[in-house]
Image: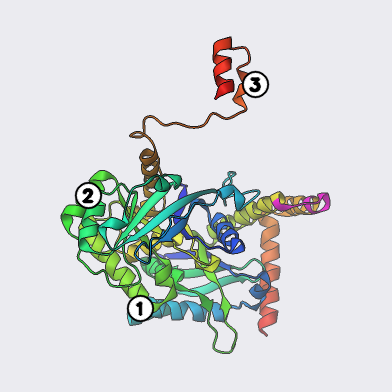
Amino acid sequence: MSVFMDLNIVNSHDKNKLTSIIETAAHLGYSTVAINYVIEPQKKKQEIPKPHSVSDIFEKFPMVQGKSTPIKVLNRLTIVASDASHFRPTNDYKLFDLVAVYPKTEKLFHAACMTFDVDIICIAVGERQPFHFKRAPVNGAIDRGVFFDISYTAAIRDSSMRRYTIANATCLMEVCKGKNIIISSGAEKSLEMRGPYDIANLGLVFGLSEGDAKAAVSTNCRSVLLHGETRATASGVVYTMKKPHTLEEQIEDKPASKKAKTETA
Amino acid sequence: MVRFKSRYLLCEVCVPERNSLQLLDERAIHHTLRAAVNRAHGDYGSALFNIGVNVKYLNALTGVVFIRCRKAHYRLIWSALPFITHLEDRGQTQNVQCFFNCIHVGGTIKTSQKFLAQYNRQQLHRMLLDCNTDAEKQHVRRALLSCSVGNVKREEADDEEGSDDDDE
């Protein structure tokens, strides 16, 4: 049994809604979920929201179905970009575990695949994809380890949206041949979540093969997380963190010079 | 002689309030499935649905359903399940919001039943974590000890009799 992840749960200000979605996800067997903060910069000069600390949501995280570990909650930022200036890598992005971009034009899609420092590229699910997927950028994205995200909630809500989702997904599959795809929920209500096995089977409708469809909810998501970690660190090799305070007691018997350092730090 | 091979989809019907599970009946589930398959796969899907798909078992207390399909096209039926958002019944005016979560796919009804017993036991273990008082904990522990496949069989037989009574 593999570890399932759902990397798109739409953030809402209603805390009860969020908790009920995460509880449902744990019940369905997802080990990791990501709360998605969507920003559309074209409206006005929009501030990038600070992610809420995940420990605020729950005092005790619900246990995952069939496992003895609590569910892991991450933060994800999605930038809806219709102009090249909308994606400005700033320090604000580093607060999020994952960064996604939803390109609206072909030029931006190309840039997102080849140059942008992101983990996930979203494709349109609620409307017709306004451009064709070209082989060069998609292959570039696959080489760089950037993943394409299909969210299925739109398909559940409405019949015409379902057509768009399936059409866009099939177009993408023709180009990327089932590689580097993740399927996520995009749920706003707990009733819009679906079980991981159902989604793996739904992947067949999107034109994925059996193995690729299962990878789209499990191993590919793990690759996304690892890619997100390398973005926050120096090539995934070196990273810095604050020293936890509990260590101070343990190093009492260390030389005096070292002890003095930790106290000033 | 080769037998017909089937697949049994063991699905859990998730509803926002547990009380509404009592409204479930096999006909409503069957009708909902038929409508969903028709919406997702059109006439072809409906044709395949008419041969070999039936609702074998329904537990209205835990919301568990066994759906039997032909092995050749169970994936087609299964791929329509995520698109179910509410139960459709011709007689009832109220729509129960729900979704289907497939927890197991089995080749025989026997293995599916074994899985279900194990799954329900797991649910009791999960309940144990949420218990606040000692009395509750004792209650769940007793329930855990009392469930084995033999007992489950008897209980299920009782349940089926019960649901038959309800239908009449």
Instruction: Quote the CA–CA distance across marks 3 and 2.
Output: 48 Å
Across and down, in percent, residue A213 comes to 35, 56
Q: Chain of mark 2?
A: A
Mark 1: few/some/many CA within 10 Å (<14, 14-19, 20+): few
Residue drawn at (26%, 44%), measured in percent from left and top? A144
Instruction: Give the residue type at disc 2.
Output: Met
Viewer-proximal residue among A165 and B143: A165
Instruction: Quote the CA–CA distance across marks 2 and 1.
Output: 32 Å
Residue drawn at (44%, 46%), measured in percent from left and top? A97
Q: Secondary structure at mark 2?
A: helix
Q: Chain of mark 1?
A: A
Q: Mark 2 vs mark 1: tell me if same chain.
A: yes
- Mark 2, mark 1: which one is toward the viewer? 2
- Predominant secondary structure, magenta span: helix
Q: Quadrant of the C terminus of chain A?
A: top right
Instruction: Find disc 2 in the rendering and name its residue.
Output: A114
Instruction: Quote the CA–CA distance across marks 1 and 3.
Output: 62 Å
